[in-house]
Image (cartoon, rainbow, N blue to C red):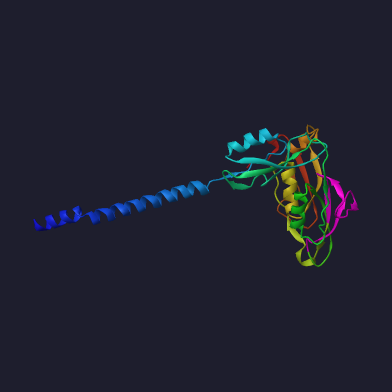
Amino acid sequence: MAAEKKSKGLADNWIVRNLVAAAALILALMIGASILLNVITRHNRTVTVPDFTNMSVEEARNAASEGHLHVKVIDSVFVRKLAAGVVYRQSPKAGAEVKRGRSIFLTINSIVPRKTTMPNLVGYSFLEARAELSNRGLNLGKLTYVSDIATNSVLEQKYRGRSIRPGEKIVSGSDIDLVLGLSREDSKTKVPNVIGMKYIRAIDAIHDRYLNTGRMHFDPEINSYRDSLNAFVYKQDAAGTSKTLGSQVNLYFTLDEGKLPQK
């Protein structure tokens, strides 16, 4: 009887009640903070970036919203063969895994030619030069390798077969060819598998491995540049094999999904 009274008295003690309430509040706050942190960071919730190439900005915005993404137009280039206002490039690239709510930055095709200033890429690494070209609204063209102690160091920059000086005005969207160094100890790369990739994404993947596109074969129904941007690779040379940097990879494009290899 005395033990029951002691237990009841302890339970009725206001200090104990407050401690229990405080502990419950702290636990609730910790659980709430954990849930809120997961919502804010979108923990483990990623989506694959769609290919917005050749879409209008409105079409790209609608496609992005389906994956809980946003698009922002940050630049424009002039591609004579491409319709005005459509997406020419994007960052991050199509196929990249990003968190929901991420903004995808778009470069669209302008209505009139716009000029940019040619940067000085000599001495840059390949990756630095490529990033700088992109920042200036210029495209990476052909990669040529010559013997040198530093692999992938830019030795010369060219436009339409001639050396181009830094500071020279050039139409945005132009292709810039690079002459790069190549040492014996670091001269090989692996050919990527680009089957199923669209035109620009496939070319980017080839360049990612320091290779060039060779002959590009298009099905007969691909009659325009717009068609080519929508076409995807259904066959290629030497996927997975080792090649010397600067080697060519032949690609075959189609609009017919039935030509894709069955998984």
Residue at horizontal 62%, vertical 34%? Answer: 62
Task: Confirm whether the magenta stretch covers residue 168.
Answer: yes
Number of callouts? 0
Relative depth, front residue between 133 and 140: 133
Q: Position of residue 48 (x, y in %)?
A: 61, 44
- The quarter of the displayed image where residue 253 is located: top right
Q: Classify residue 66 as left or right of residue 126.
A: left
Q: Position of residue 40 (x, y in %)?
A: 51, 47
**Residue 50 can be seen, yes or no:** no
Relative depth, front residue between 41 and 254: 41
Residue at horizontal 24%, vertical 56%? Answer: 16
Q: Position of residue 143 (x, y in %)?
A: 82, 54
Q: Is residue 26 above or below residue 78?
A: below
Relative depth, front residue between 91 and 230: 91
Q: Is residue 23 above or below residue 46?
A: below
Residue at horizontal 75%, vertical 47%? Answer: 203
Start and end of the magenta stretch? 151-178
Task: Confirm whether the magenta stretch covers residue 153.
Answer: yes
Q: Quadrant of the N terminus?
A: bottom left
Q: Classify residue 97 as left or right of residue 73.
A: left
**Residue 167 can be seen, yes or no:** yes
Q: Classify residue 4 as left or right of residue 69.
A: left
Q: Residue furthest right?
A: 162
Q: Residue furthest left?
A: 1
Q: Position of residue 185 (x, y in %)?
A: 76, 67
Q: Classify residue 68 as left or right of residue 153.
A: left
Q: Quadrant of the C terminus?
A: top right
Residue at horizontal 76%, vertical 64%? Answer: 186
